[in-house]
Amino acid sequence: MGPDPFGRALRDHYLGEREEPLLDRDGSRTREQPIERWYFAPFDGDPFLDSWLRGPLLDMGAGVGRQTLHYQDAFETVAIEVSERLVRTMRERGVEDARLADMFALREAFERDRFRSALAIGTQVCLAGSMSGLKGFLADLAYVTTPDATAVIDSYDPTLAATAETFGYRADPTPGLAHRVYHCEYEGWVGETLLFRVVSPERLREAAIGTGWQVAEVRHHPPAGPVQFRAALTKG
């Protein structure tokens, strides 16, 4: 396994062995992640998510399984992560099907029509890095989901003025687009630089064209914060 400061910090926290903070760094700016609140706080469902998700469900970038633990009680839920430490932690926390897999290589991990819904909460879809990368991700997600599938993803909305205050934010002259750039550090371990392509709801609709998906509903001001939105996608 590589440095994986994010996975190390969350696993140490789960084991009660974490003594240092998990930091995000963007040049001279530093942010400490509130690990307990963001990743381990109990999740009892969310009306917007509940209305769009059904099984079998694919939880992409599942972290330590916060949402997975809830939804697996209702239907089959498969959680994927790129960190072996996080996969191990999910299994120890009771996730029934946690797998080491890359959400940007879905065709390599799953067969066609495997899932009836998919979830990616935490803006990790933005790690597609570009509009073309986002379009490719959506096409691959369409491949591994059924013709009547649904999906819920989220992003920061760069059309909102307050989004410019988001950690790691980089403005873009193209309307509806921006970037976020930062890396994680923990106990001297330095992670790779993360490049997020932040898209507005309208840009998400544009990226979905030709992928088999369409944006069915957008909900601003979710529990994650006032400058984010969640989008429900349907096949169409």
Image: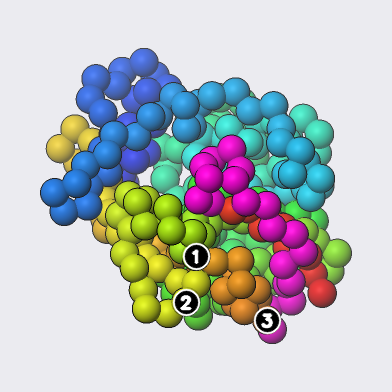
Quadrant position of the C terminus in the picture: bottom right
In the image, taking residue 37 as reference, residue 94 lies left or right, namely right
**Badge 2 vs badge 3, beta-carbon distance below 8 Å:** no
Disc number placed over residue 175 in the picture, else none: 2
Mark 1 → mark 3, Cα distance in angstroms: 21 Å
Q: Dot 1 surroundings within 10 Å: few (below 14), some, or many (20 or more)?
A: some
Q: In the structure shown, which secondary structural element does the residue marked by tag 2 occupy?
A: loop
Would residue 222 be counted in the magenta stretch? yes
Viewer-proximal residue, 83 or 138?
138
Q: Does label 2 or label 3 sit earlier along the sequence? A: 2
Q: Which residue is mark 1?
A: 159
Under mark 2, the amino acid is Pro
Q: Which residue is mark 3?
A: 209
Under mark 3, the amino acid is Ile
**Residue 50: horizontal and vertical position, in percent?**
78, 41
In the image, taking residue 173 as reference, residue 97 lies left or right, namely right
| Residue under the image location 50 percent in, 50 percent down | 227
Q: Is residue 146 above or below residue 120?
A: below
Q: Is residue 142 above or below residue 68?
A: below
Under mark 1, the amino acid is Thr
Q: Is residue 107 visible?
A: no
| Residue under the image location 84 percent in, 69 percent down | 147
Q: Dot 3 surroundings within 10 Å: few (below 14), some, or many (20 or more)?
A: some
The magenta span reads: 210-228
Choose top left, top right, bottom left or bottom right for residue 93.
top right
Q: Is residue 22 above or below residue 153?
A: above
**Badge 2 vs badge 1, beta-carbon distance below 8 Å:** yes
In the image, taking residue 143 as reference, residue 20 lies left or right, namely left
